[in-house]
Amino acid sequence: MMRFIAVLLLFIPGVLSAYGIKLMRDTVFNEFHPLFFNVGIQFIIGLILFVLGLAFIGGFIVHRDRKKNLIKKKK
């Protein structure tokens, strides 16, 4: 059950990151979504979603590795 919850915790930020990439790509190819009132805002929101999702997944992996003592200490 704990692994299922962990997969769900990684799935949601992964989907948000993918949506952020899609928003940035749509901005580059001039696809405008009516939810955003400016193309620049659409790109910034996409970038924020991508970075936050990536940071969450990276932080989750670092936390897991530190808990299992897989990361070496700095000197």
Image (spheres, grey):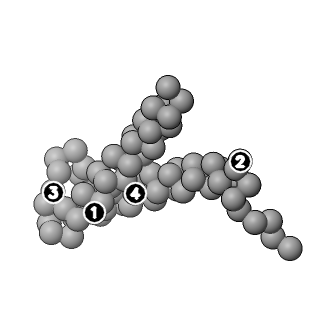
- For label 1, the SS is helix
Residue toward you, 14 or 64:
64
Three-letter code, disc 1: Met
Residue occupying the point 65% across, 54% down: 65
Residue on which disc 2 sits: 67
Compute the Cα span from label 3 to label 1.
11 Å
Query: For numbered disc 4, what is the local secondary structure?
Result: helix
Q: Mark 2 or mark 1: which is in front?
A: 2
Amino acid type indicated by mark 2: Lys
Q: Count neighbours of disc 1 (C-alpha within 10 A) and say few if under 14, some if 14 to 19, many if 20 or more.
A: many
Q: Tell me where residue 5 appears, x and y as whole percent.
A: 48, 31
- Disc 4 marks which residue? 50
Question: In the rendering, which numbered label is found on residue 24?
Answer: 1
Sequence-wise, which precedes: disc 2 or disc 1? Answer: 1
Name the amino acid, label 3. Answer: Phe
Residue 13: image location, x then y, percent: 42, 45
Whether pointer 2 and pointer 1 mark residues with C-beta atoms closer than 8 Å, the reply is no
Amino acid at dot 4: Phe
- Please state which of residues 45 and 22 is positioned toward the viewer in this rendering: 22
Closer to viewer: mark 4 or mark 2: 2
Q: In the rendered view, would you say 25 is above or below 42?
A: below
